[in-house]
Structure formats: structure tokens, C-alpha cells
Amino acid sequence: MGFNNDGNRRGFSSDRRQEFGYERRFEKRFDNRGEKRFDRRPPAEKVVTAMGDADAKPQVAVGGIKEVTDVLTKEPLKVHRVLFMHQSGNPKLYELQKLAKKAHVHVQQVDSKILDSYARPNQGVVALMNEKELLGWLDVREELFAAKEKGEKKLIAVATNIEDPRNLGACIRSCLALGVDLFLIPAKGMCGITPSVARTSAGALEKMRVCRPDNLEAAIGELKMAGYQVVGLDADTETNLADYKFADQVVIAVGGEDVGLPPFVKKQCDAILRIPMMPEAHSYNASVALSLGLYEFARLRIKA
């Protein structure tokens, strides 16, 4: 189901195409021997805060090789994405990129102006931080397997490819309201848990358990092998959501605003469910689709 994003798609690159309100200054980049200096940092008075969404506080951005190394080492699940200066030529940045990939944190090569728009000084690297530290798959998997063995009811929601922070925040809010035990998101291909996500969740983010497995496909596969029922919400099916027979342990997955469910999720689904919709309507917003799916599960569980 190609879910719409309410006209608010805010891709990473498009956010940074505006002109920046400061005069660019160039620091001395070479030592007395003519060798390039990679550790030169601007003085503190030139530090600028990260740019953020207009309706929320700025996203926390950590700049600097030592600083980014520290957060990747100590709090990798609080890091959403690490941005590196394109073709920097700095060997320390290449080593840091290896560390980020080892921590399964998404990395991206960008122009130096984009880095400066988030944080200065930055030494060619900026880490964009989530509003809360997420759970790892190893933090929750044994609990979920044990619940299945004991016959306990469990509801897990999965969201992929959601780029609009307000859409993601609405998903989290609905998850908390409709009894979701765990919310799974991929390591890349999503917006981060930004201040706009927190704001739109209306407090639900602090109470909802959010997990970012290193490999979402493998995590869903493990749940399926353990006996969890996996269902996806998508328009490309004839099976109706209404009165679908859910199991006691269910994974409900929703795709992104424009691309729908990714193939790696679809192939693991026991069923793809279509939400009733008038023919003249194009599609449901991702958070609305997830809310309707979760509501149907909750309604039938209460009725039973």
C-alpha cells in the first residue's frame, strides 16, 4: 500500500538546500611543513546549533571525531545516522566509518555545508541523535520467545520506510493507545526519532518500547519461526482486514508513505491484509493504516 505522507515528506537532502545565515570562514588547514591538518577546530564562539524542524526544537547533533567516536562506542542505539564529509581524505574518518557500520548505524557522505548546518565545529563528521536510546534485538528476543511458549498474548508493530517524522510520531502514539508491546523499526531507511516525532507522539514515545534490530528481516524471521503470526497491511491484496482471524501472538507490519511494504517483509507474511477504502480514495496515510490494523486486532481481542 503506497501510503501518503500528507504532503509533508521531508527528505534529508531537501531539508538542507536552503541558504545558511552565516558567512563562511576558512580555517588554516596546513601546518608549517605544508601537510594538511585534520584536527584543526574552529574556536568555541563559532559553534552553531543544529537546524531542526520549524515546529520543534532542533535535533541533537554531535560534531567532532572524538565526540562521535564516544557516542558510537557508549550509546550506539541512540545514534540515528552519521554524516561524513564527502571525499575528506582523512584516514581517521574512514576508521570512524568502519566503527559506525560495525554498530549497524547508517552512514552517509554529504557536502561540508550540510555538516556545518547541523553542528560546528565538526571535523568532517556529525552524528544525528535519536530523542531516546532504542532497544537492541538481544534486549527483547528471549522475552518474546518465552511469551510464545507460555501462550501469553503479544502484539508487535513494525514500520518501515517512513520518512515523515510526524507520521512516525503518530504511529508510536497509536501503538501505545492500542496495546502494542513492542515497536520495531529498521536500522536505515527511516527518519530518526527526532523532536518532531516526540512532539507528535504526545508523550507516547517515553512510554513505548522501540527496538531497532541490526537486521530487521532476520528479527521478523526469528519471530515467525517461534510461531508468531506475521501480517502486513497493503493495498495489493484481496484479503480484507475486517474480521481476519488473528493469533494470540501477532506481528503487524506497515510500509512507507510511497513504497508500501518492502519485499523482505512481504515474503515473510502469513497474510497481506487490505483495509476497506472507497474506490476514489488513493491510499491511507501510513500511521492511519497502522492504527486501523491495530484497532481491528484490539477490537477482536476484546470481543473474544
Image: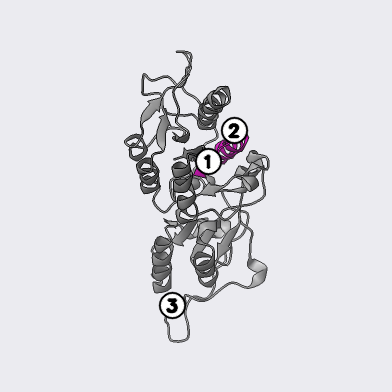
- Label 1: element kind: loop
- Quadrant the N terminus occupies: top left
- Numbered tag placed on residue 10 in the rendering: 1
- Label 3 packing within 10 angstroms: few (<14), some (14-19), many (20+): some
Please state which amino acid type lies under the numbered disc 1.
Answer: Arg
Q: Residue at x 42, y 82 (%)?
A: 34
Where residue 222 appears, as percent x and y from the top left, is 37, 46
- Label 3: element kind: loop
Viewer-side label of 3, 1? 1
Please state which amino acid type lies under the numbered disc 3.
Answer: Lys
Where residue 277 appears, as percent x and y from the top left, is 48, 16
**What stretch of residues is rendered in magenta?**
165-184
Give whichever of discs 1 and 2 has the lower sequence position: 1
The answer to whether any part of residue 260 appears in the image is: no
Where residue 215 appears, as percent x and y from the top left, is 39, 51
- Numbered tag placed on residue 125 in the rendering: none
Magenta stretch: helix, strand or loop mostly? helix
